[in-house]
């Protein structure tokens, strides 16, 4: 059995953001920096947080880009130091939440943040307090010990994986996801499903977390179409946010080739969740072609968790769900421009997600998987 690290404290409920002020006092944070993006400022969610923290002097940095970059982190660091902050609150989706992990290191460590992305072993326990507040239901980044940061826009991600970047507290308030537009509801929801699927299929053995992954998959399938159709459906939003949290827990078992493809395709500005779900069927078809009895049994369990009719395979089930919620079924249809299969496959075979894959593709097999995923 694999031993997984503990998860951070989680407060999960409608209106949970109302508990934030009390948590700051408990943790001795007197002047927090809120990091977020300009979209959340525009849509009033930053004001919601400001109201919840009316008794605190706060600083705000809303320059985190849609895909996290070193430049965004350095901009936030400048505000953190100028405003003499003593803690970080990240309000947003995966880009904001992962940026906060790097920022809590940059605020206390002596070298430029890029050095800790190149070598996460340099990260020590000397990090600033960090609270995450997700506004999308998909990435699971609110509780994980790693993230991907682009050195510059368009460049491949570097990882920042360390137990010291794991958030101290996640406040999961479904009400904060009500304004998420349909296309992002679909993309982030299927990102959660991808985390649950790959965690369940990984070569780790942890039955309690595997059960969490299967439950998360069923929540996505039961509620994503409702949330896409009606963003104000609070019950659907609750279950999708819970599925995202379960996906974050599943990530601790390790990911695999679907996220290898997502990592390689991240040299584009396309949405991570949409890339993951468009890539998944090709990887599933690769698994199905191997004729591995144990893996086939797990694929059957995933079909049941997705409530697929008898005779419908997992790859087809994911593709059909993508179609129902308006997501493209190929990476090319998303607008990905690169078609150099040899270069893509060469990059894929050395990515760390391969270590927990149930079957590790060879370079030639990755070439075929990329061709299938691109469509």
Image: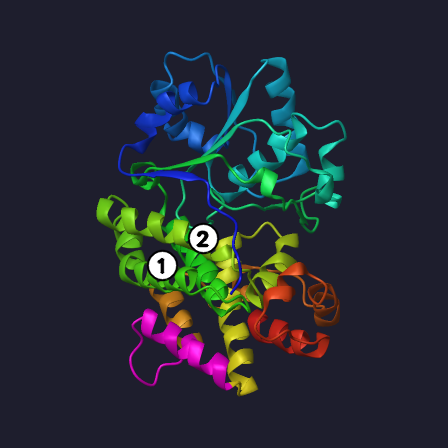
Q: Dot 1: what SS?
A: helix
Q: Is residue 297 magenta?
A: yes
| Whether residue 148 can be seen here | yes
x and y percentages locating residue 210 in the rendered image? 42, 64
Q: Residue at x 37, y 21 (%)?
A: 21
Q: Residue at x 69, y 76 (%)?
A: 362
Q: Locate residue 345: give its quadrant.
A: bottom right
x and y percentages locating residue 367 in the rendered image? 68, 75
Name the disc covering residue 103, or none: none
Foreground residue among 153 and 282: 282
Q: Dot 2: what SS?
A: helix
Task: Give the class, few, some or many, for how many residues have Cα within 10 Å of label 1's Cα (few <14, many ≥20).
Answer: many
Foreground residue among 82 and 18: 18
Figure check: 292 above or below 142:
below
Foreground residue among 363 and 331: 363
Check if mark 2's residue and mark 1's residue have beta carbons within 8 Å: yes
Main secondary structure found in the magenta portion? helix
Q: Which residue is mark 1?
A: 216
x and y percentages locating residue 199 in the rendered image? 49, 62
Q: Locate residue 209: give its quadrant.
A: bottom left
Which segment did they paint magenta? Answer: 293-314
How is this picture coloured?
rainbow
Figure check: 100 above or below 119:
above
Task: Give the class, few, some or many, for how many residues have Cα within 10 Å of label 2's Cα (few <14, many ≥20).
Answer: many
Q: Which residue is mark 2?
A: 249
x and y percentages locating residue 113 in the rendered image? 71, 34
Left or right: where 162 falls relative to 17: right
Left or right: where 302 falls relative to 253: left
Spatial CA span between label 2 and label 1: 10 Å
- Which of disc 1 and disc 2 is earlier in sequence? 1
């Amino acid at each position: 059995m694999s031993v997984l690290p503990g998860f951070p404290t989680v407060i999960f409920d409608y209106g949970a953001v109302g508990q934030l002020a009390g948590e700051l006092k408990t943790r001795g944070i007197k002047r927090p920096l809120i990091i977020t993006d300009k979209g959340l400022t525009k849509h009033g969610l930053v004001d919601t947080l400001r109201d919840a923290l009316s008794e605190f002097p706060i600083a705000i940095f809303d320059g985190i880009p849609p895909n996290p970059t070193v430049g965004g982190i350095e901009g936030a660091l400048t505000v953190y130091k100028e405003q003499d902050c003593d803690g970080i609150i990240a309000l947003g989706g995966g880009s904001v939440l992962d940026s906060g992990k790097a920022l809590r290191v940059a605020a206390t460590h002596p070298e430029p943040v890029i050095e800790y992305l190149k070598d996460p072993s340099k990260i020590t326990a000397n990090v600033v307090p960090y609270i995450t507040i997700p506004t999308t239901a998909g990435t699971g980044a609110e509780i994980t010990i790693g993230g991907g940061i682009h050195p510059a826009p368009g460049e491949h991600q570097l990882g920042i994986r360390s137990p010291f970047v794991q958030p101290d507290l996640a406040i999961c308030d479904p009400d904060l996801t009500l304004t998420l537009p349909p296309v992002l509801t679909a993309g982030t929801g299927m990102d959660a499903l991808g985390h649950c699927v790959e965690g369940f299929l990984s070569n780790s053995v942890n039955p309690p977390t595997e059960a969490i992954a299967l439950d998360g998959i069923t929540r996505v399938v039961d509620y994503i179409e409702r949330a896409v159709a009606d963003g104000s459906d609070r019950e659907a939003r609750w279950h999708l946010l819970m599925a995202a949290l379960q996906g974050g827990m599943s990530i601790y078992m390790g990911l695999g080739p679907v996220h290898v493809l997502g990592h390689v395709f991240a040299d584009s500005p396309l949405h991570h969740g949409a890339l993951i779900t468009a890539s998944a069927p090709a990887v599933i078809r690769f698994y199905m072609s191997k004729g591995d009895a144990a893996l086939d049994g797990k694929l059957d369990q995933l079909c049941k968790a997705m409530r697929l009719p008898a005779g419908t395979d997992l790859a087809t089930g994911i593709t059909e769900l993508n179609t129902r919620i308006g997501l493209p079924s190929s990476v090319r249809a998303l607008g990905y421009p690169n078609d150099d299969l040899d270069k893509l496959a060469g990059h894929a075979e050395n990515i760390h997600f391969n270590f927990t894959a149930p079957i590790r593709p060879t370079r030639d097999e990755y070439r075929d998987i990329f061709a299938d995923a691109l469509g």
